[in-house]
Image: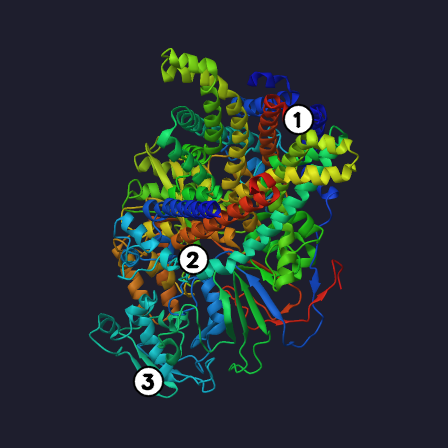
Amino acid sequence: MSSVLRFAVRRAGWAMVVVLASVTLVFTLMYGVGDPCVGKLGANARPEQLQACHVQLGMDRPLSVQLLGYLGITPGPDGVRHGLLQGELGESLVHGDPVTEVVWRRLPRTALLGGLALLFQVVLGVAIGVAAAVYRGKPMDTLLMSFTFLMISIPGFLLGIFALHGPAFLLGWFPVGGYGVGAMDHVRHALLPSMVLGALGAATYARLMRGELVDTLSLDHVRTARAKGLSPTRVLWVHGVRNALIPVVTLIGLDLPLLVSGAIVTEEIFAWPGLGKLALESVVAMDAPIVVGLVVVISVAVQLGNVTADLATAWLDPRARQ
Amino acid sequence: MGWRGWRDSRVLVGLVLVVAVVAVAVVGPWFSPHAPDTQFREQLLGNGALGTRGIPAGIGDVTGHPLGGDTLGRDVLARLLHGGRVSLTVAFVGSLVAVTLGLLVGMYTGYVGGAWDRLLMRLVDLMLSLPFLLIAIAVQAVVASSNIWSLCIMLGLLSWMTLARIVRAKTQQVKGLEYVQAARSMGASPVRIVFTHVLPNVLGPVWILGTSLAASMILAESALSYLGLGVAPPTPSWGSMLREGQELLGYAPRLVLLPGLMILLAVFGFNLMGEGLRDAQDPRHG
Amino acid sequence: MGSPRPRVILALFLVAGLGATALGLCDRVSLRSLLPQAPQGPRVWGAGHRDPQYGGTFVFGAGSNVRTLDPHVAYDQLSYTAIRLMFDGLLDYQDAKLVPSIAESLPEVSGDGTELVFRLRRNVRFHNGRLLTAADVDWSMHRMLNPATGSPGFPFFKKLVGVHRFREGTAARIAGIEVLDSHTIAFTLTEADQAFLNAMALTFAYPLPREHYDDRNVDAQTQPLGTGPFVLKPGGWERGVRLTFQRFERYWRPGLPYVDQMVYLENLGREVATLRFRSGELSTTNAFSLADYLWFQSAKAWQPYVAKEAEATIWGLVMNNEIPPFDNVHVRRAVAHAIHREQWNQAKAGQLRLTGQPLPPQIAGHDPQLPHEQTYDLALAKQEMALAGYPGGYPHTIALWIGEGDASRLYGELAQADLARIGLRITLKPVSFAVYLQETAKRGQVPFFFSGWNQDYPDATSFFDVLWHCGSISDTGSNNTSFYCNPELDDLLDGARRTLDPRQREQMYRRASNLVARDAPWAFIWNSTTFEAWQPYVKNYRINPVVAGDYRFVWIDGPVRKGDAKP
């Protein structure tokens, strides 16, 4: 029990370190290297306004003081502590909405997109991987593996552009970008972008799955099981797939940052109003609070995902459970 | 050890592809019929070609421009050839930065161990949890210089971690070998041991990872260029050509397909090479 | 082992590669025949009603953010589009002419042009149900001109008597604004100002209800309350994504508006916008990629539903007159004559209306026979370079600042190639819009940049007085970004602003145009056009030449989806 607790505490501590480091990095980038005030005032900004903006944002103070203020450790320019520790992420410089509100509104959308993509890549990846392993050495194997290889080598945005023009626009199978109104409509709009987003993952998992499965099926105890007369299907699923899933699940956890990167491009192409599109728009507009807030939320989400993957690995792998 | 890999024909195919693409990028510009930024407006935009229904003149329409022109009447062949230089420079220099850093950190932590080891490995874990593209676009937007070298360095600094981890593990393994232990006890300097025993042994994995790194660098550069945060305008790169070509996608698909194909070829080649090398080293994953 | 046979991969790969190459090379001919056919006409049609129909949803989009819904603060087209759905001004524009809106009629103007009296309609209601009175106009003008509001509108109203004292805080009220009775209000100016009436049609002068905007709990940027035909739905604005408006039932214009709901999508990229429009998901669009622009020009079935309209803008290369080599008028002229305008237009598929003078054709003062019109003339340009003392070219490289979009890049590269021919070496410096605005407004900062100016109202003052008057120069917040200062021009402009006789005024602005074209603080290149397409079911829409995106009074002819077939 205590070891579990210790693990949990250590894991949580580490997650906090990661979040903190990410925030420091991006905060320095946005406020130290760049100047968010030029993003705030937008069209028709007058330089006097810029000066005033620097004072208002407390950017006349040293960067370290600003960072401590952002974290909520020291008071902000108005003398009140309101930062990360207080659960506040500031306000957008472009439009003044609270960052937490903006991010919370968009998080479910990216979660929907990412969730569907994950589902898609795991299901399709495992299916292709199993099929290729079963038919290994046969033309089917070659075909599937060549296909996954192509998916790995094609730039995601190229795939997105073609998907948007082909299946969506020309064939009319999917909505042409956007988010829709109502839950079912959201899902309908999410289908194509999530497939594009999940394509790379599906290919990666398929290749990994095939490799692991080929290994596992040649292990002694699996051979023994087969020799004992268990049905090949049962051997495949119980002994093969279950074991082979372990590295795949571990990889899902580690791949989450990759999914975030993919979401930026995919959401941009499909005009999907999620965190990725927000990230790109905010970076271009130098809307620093949104960018830093996004990094907070994304790194927390990634850490949570990692922990979940760890737990899932433990559940799948009896050795790890003990 | 790693050299066994050359026998795998995937490595060979990958190598041929990579060499071909590299040759196109290195030698191609010398044979390029035109400069990449010369605008042949009279020939390729003239006669209201764009104004009526036309596209910038296509293949066969204009002598001396086998692949036609782009939106500005620039020779597409010349731009493909020169654009390759930029994309591949990013791939090679970026990977070089990542490999160098990964090697240094990996060998140091693997060989010396101790507090720095723990600290640096923590850094590796940390950087692996960063959303790569988000950081990259933030850096590009803030720096705003769109300079090719700063792009290389940034991509390199964001990609050395996996390599460092593997090099570290390999170094630890080599360090534990009996003959290395013997060499140490005979007073060989750490530097000497690293160079004579460790380095040759880690080169195998470095080759494998280096090739797939190069592939991902090309993809990253093209993604950044596509998002409008790549190299500065007059310089062509395959990614920026693709973005510019999107403007005329319905009319002149070649403006998108050709640079897209070049990216695909290069990435495919590097990936194939890496794949083959890995399997050759670790036949288990056949 | 079980490894996929490399030779098979190679073969597959080669086939795929060759196939893609072939597709790439053969361009549209073979590709078109291989791919499914894109719809050649609208997918959604109108039901065929002749009389206006009520109801329906109108959906449109924009490529960027709506910044604010506070009419007194907004100063960009995208915000205007939203604001004009929800607010009315005393005056409005119809086909570039001033027409009364909340005012019963155009104001009575005294003989010397310094006193204007507006009479207001008695049936104008705010969205909270209260009737509008002259006191609302009075309060709103004071709110807008109060420096605390942060409105960029002050320069348009600086001729109001007592406005400076009010802004300095030495007077509680602006002396030049007087409420005569509940529905009559008078404005007094220090001298005749031919631009003042236009200023009264800007959103800066829109009347707002005091009880709403004085409420500390109200965020003026996001919680609009006006007299317009539409109301922002509660929680109807998700910043950066979409705004949803619904019909205001008690709108003062009888029987209007027609549609129940307006949806305004933000940050919609050009490619997606056009594809969604062609799929029938958007009611209208005005952002096209080059390919889409060409396609819509030629798609027969779409011709009744597209329109091209000249915009009153001026675009060109701005040269900072205080920074070498552009402090030399000959270099500036050389640049103005080196730009091959025809070819620029070819690269933009004929979307530009080329020009070589400061005012667009629809503004009085534009001269079709301008003596010093800037035209492409390479020999002349080289001559000017020689006169400037650089017969062999300018020895240093000059940075040309451009915006971040693809279009700016294209123009930058065109300029680069043109100027290389007269020995000016140019590097391109792409910067974000915000940085560009900030830096170009500073003295001695940016030598050379690509710029455009959109009129605030259809009058020559909206160009000359802002862009080339010595009075618009300041060290850090200069509107005159070329830092061109010519007392002769200033005299002309100040005189014209006071002049009441329109013909005499026009002559003065023609002289001013000639002066500015000759001294070439800008290389004038083109006036833009807007190209718009709308679904066949959208009725009663006409492009408003002064304010883009005026969709207030469209009606929807019960859309019918008929696939690709014509009805």
Three-letter code for the amino acid on which mark 1 is drawn:
Gly
User: Picture quarter containing residue C141?
Assistant: bottom left
Q: Distance between the residues labelled 2 and 3?
A: 42 Å
- Count neighbours of disc 1 (C-alpha within 10 A) and say few if under 14, some if 14 to 19, many if 20 or more: some
The secondary structure type at the circle numbered 2 is loop
Residue at image mark 2: C367
Image coloring type: rainbow
Asked if the residue at tag 3 contacts the one at tag 1, i.e. Cβ–Cβ closer than 8 Å, the answer is: no
Three-letter code for the amino acid on which mark 2 is drawn:
Asp
Q: Position of residue C442 (x, y in %)?
A: 29, 51
Q: In this view, does A103 lie to the left or right of C506?
A: right
Q: Nearer the viewer, residue C566 or B46?
A: C566
Asked if the residue at tag 3 contacts the one at tag 2, i.e. Cβ–Cβ closer than 8 Å, the answer is: no
Residues at marks 2 and 1, common chain? no
Q: In this view, does C252 lie to the left or right of B250?
A: left
The first of marks 2 and 3 along the sequence is 3
Q: Where is residue C20 in the image (x, y as percent from the top left)?
A: 68, 34
Of tags 1 and 3, the one toward the viewer is 1
Identify the residue at the far bottom of this view.
C181
Report the disc number at residue B286.
1
User: Picture quarter containing residue A228?
Assistant: top right
Quadrant location of the N terminus of chain C? Answer: top right
Residue at image mark 3: C179
Q: How far apart are marks 1 and 3 (CA)?
A: 89 Å
- Count neighbours of disc 2 (C-alpha within 10 A) and say few if under 14, some if 14 to 19, many if 20 or more: many
Q: Where is residue B191 in the image (x, y as percent from the top left)?
A: 37, 17
Q: Is residue B56 visible?
A: no
